[in-house]
């Protein structure tokens, strides 16, 4: 009788521990959503930045991307399209961030479709509010299509297509 009670207690402990681990481990979809939120937070700028701090933030932004990535940004008068290596991204990020005195990015409606264990598609909307370096205010809403790959246990952007600003 005692033998069966001990076996039952061990079985319950193992099942409980397995359930706790399974429920505690975040899904890939939630990790991707968190990755997108972290990217928009890292892209935000609260004020003037010393050159060394700006370089560090630009490098941090590059770390959200795969070794090779396609980036396409549509817009009036400004259109960027090309394939880039991760090490090519920090100078571009510094140039874009230099256009802004402040920039706050907010993410909305993140939809993720994991296409395999190592790839996913994401569609989300980003609102930029801030001040240009010249002092003008800016408020833009853009839809973004992204492809992500899982490398070394981390989700990274392999493609980012940013649509023209949504007009009211």
Image: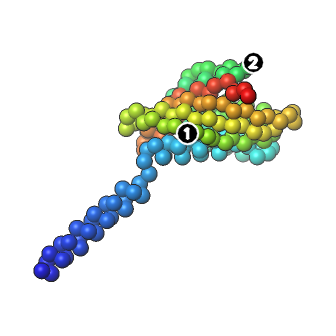
Q: CA distance from mark 1 to mark 2?
A: 28 Å
| Residue found at x 63% / y 25% | 163
Q: Is residue 148 left or right of residue 3?
A: right
Q: Position of residue 27 (x, y in %)?
A: 42, 48
Callout 2: SS: loop
Residue 8 spot, x, y in % from top left:
20, 72
Q: Quadrant of residue 58?
A: top right
- The quarter of the image holding the C terminus is top right
The residue at 31%/60% (across/down) is 18
Is 131 or 164 nearer to us in this picture?
Answer: 164
Q: Which mark is residue 110?
A: 1
Look at mark 2 in the image and give the residue it sits on: 77
Q: Would you say 117 lies left or right of 133 here?
A: left
Say how many tags the image has.
2
Question: In the image, is residue 84 above or below residue 139?
Answer: above
10 Å neighbourhood of mark 2: few (<14), some, or many (≥20)?
Answer: few
């Amino acid at each position: 009788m005692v033998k069966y009670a001990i076996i039952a207690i061990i079985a319950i402990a193992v099942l409980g521990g397995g359930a706790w681990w399974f429920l505690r481990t975040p899904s890939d979809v939630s990790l991707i959503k968190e990755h997108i939120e972290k990217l928009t937070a890292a892209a935000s700028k609260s004020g003037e930045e010393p050159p060394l701090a700006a370089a560090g933030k630009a490098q941090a932004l590059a770390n959200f991307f795969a070794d090779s990535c396609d980036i396409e940004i549509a817009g009036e008068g400004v259109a960027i399209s090309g394939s880039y290596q991760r090490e090519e991204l920090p100078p571009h990020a510094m140039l874009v961030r230099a256009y802004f005195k402040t920039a706050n990015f907010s993410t909305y409606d993140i939809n993720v479709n994991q296409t395999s264990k190592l790839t996913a598609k994401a569609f989300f909307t980003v609102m930029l509010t801030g001040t240009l370096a010249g002092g003008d205010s800016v408020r833009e809403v853009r839809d973004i299509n992204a492809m992500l790959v899982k490398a070394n246990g981390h989700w990274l952007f392999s493609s980012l297509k940013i649509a023209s600003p949504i007009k009211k």
